[in-house]
Image (cartoon, grey):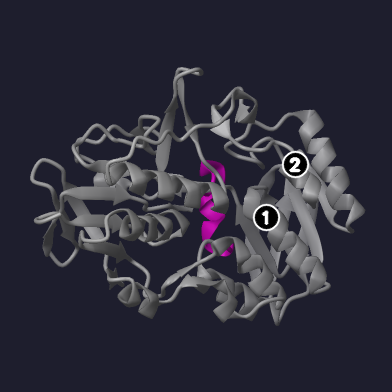
Amino acid sequence: MSGEHFIIIGNGPAGNQAALTLRESAPDTPVTLISKDHEGSYRPNLLPKLIAGKIGEEDLYVSGVNAYKERDIKLRAGQRVAAVDLEGKKVILDHKERLGYTGLILAVGGTPRIPENMLAFQDLMATLKNLLDAKNWIKKLEKVESVLIIGGDLTSLGVTRALLQLEKKVYFMLNEEAFWPLRCDKEMLEEVANRLTGKGVEVLIDQRLKGVARVSETVCRVEIGESRLEVGIIGAFFGLHPDIRFLAGSGLRMDRGILVDPYLYTGFDGVYATGDCAQIYHPALKDYWVSIGHDNARELGKIAAMNLAGGKVKAEVGGKSIFEEEGIRVNTSWWMEF
């Protein structure tokens, strides 16, 4: 439509799918995709396979940089959004440029979460959120033989599988925070521990991290409970914090993420939030739920775009798929595939 301009912030699975869907649903409307990364959109869920050497970097990509030009989507790569003026309908980039929009999709994803009691050691921990992280893992693994995995989000078991394929010694520390944002009970911990042990992983269950010290380039000394370990890498996997600090003071309703209704609408005209950064209202629960995982992110990106283009599609999930204590959409037996 004349005068319309749709902007998407974020080029992860949700943002990429939103851009592709908008191009189909609103073929005559200009679409701009703003990404802080310089690459095109890739599948972060495949990064453990890259680490294991099972796929090449080219196999990660859903849309390369040139693919957006072919689809008439303007990609603003390597640029960060500093703020959003929801009343004036402007996106403000960190170099002060202001972009006007009639429709906006927030698909900013998240940043790796480190529990507060471990923040003192975060500089000695490796996370896996993006391609650069994966390349750092590959470089480090050339020099070490053992890895300690702490936490247990969706990525951690993929990394553990990759490490075993590389014939590395793997320790896995499990406690009640391991599967955040799920609340982990004793039965769940024991079942996961049995799965891991059966694959040759040494499991440290219900232990506390007391200290970490860098001994050399390839050795970290770790105190866990009454035990001491020397490992080459410490991998931290505690899920993601929505990357929404730049939206503070915008007027958006935010809790863990951006609060939206079942249609992913934020309450501001033409503004939707989707993927890891969104908390979606569930009428039956009378509470909000959070989507976890690559496939869920792509589906929510599609729904946000369809609704921005004039649709009325709900982001629905059955009650049995909702973890009852947290209102989180997760298959609580996903580790059974390990």
Taking the spot 37% from the left edge, 80% from the top edge, the residue there is: 66
- Quadrant for residue 97, please give it: bottom left
The span picked out in magenta is 112-126
Is 88 covered by the magenta stretch? no
Q: Position of residue 48 (x, y in %)?
A: 66, 66
Is 120 covered by the magenta stretch? yes
Report the front residue among 279 and 203: 279
In the image, taking residue 35 as reference, residue 192 lies left or right, namely right
Q: Position of residue 276 (x, y in %)?
A: 46, 46
From this view, report whether residue 262 is shown above or below residue 47.
Answer: above
Q: Which mark is residue 207?
A: 2
Instruction: Look at the numbered discs 2 and 1 and tell me whether their residues touch, using CB distance below 8 Å.
Output: no
Report the front residue among 30 and 134: 30
**What secondary structure is found at the residue carrying circle 1?**
helix
Q: Which mark is residue 205?
A: none
From this view, report whether residue 205 is shown above or below residue 65.
Answer: above
Q: Which mark is residue 156?
A: 1
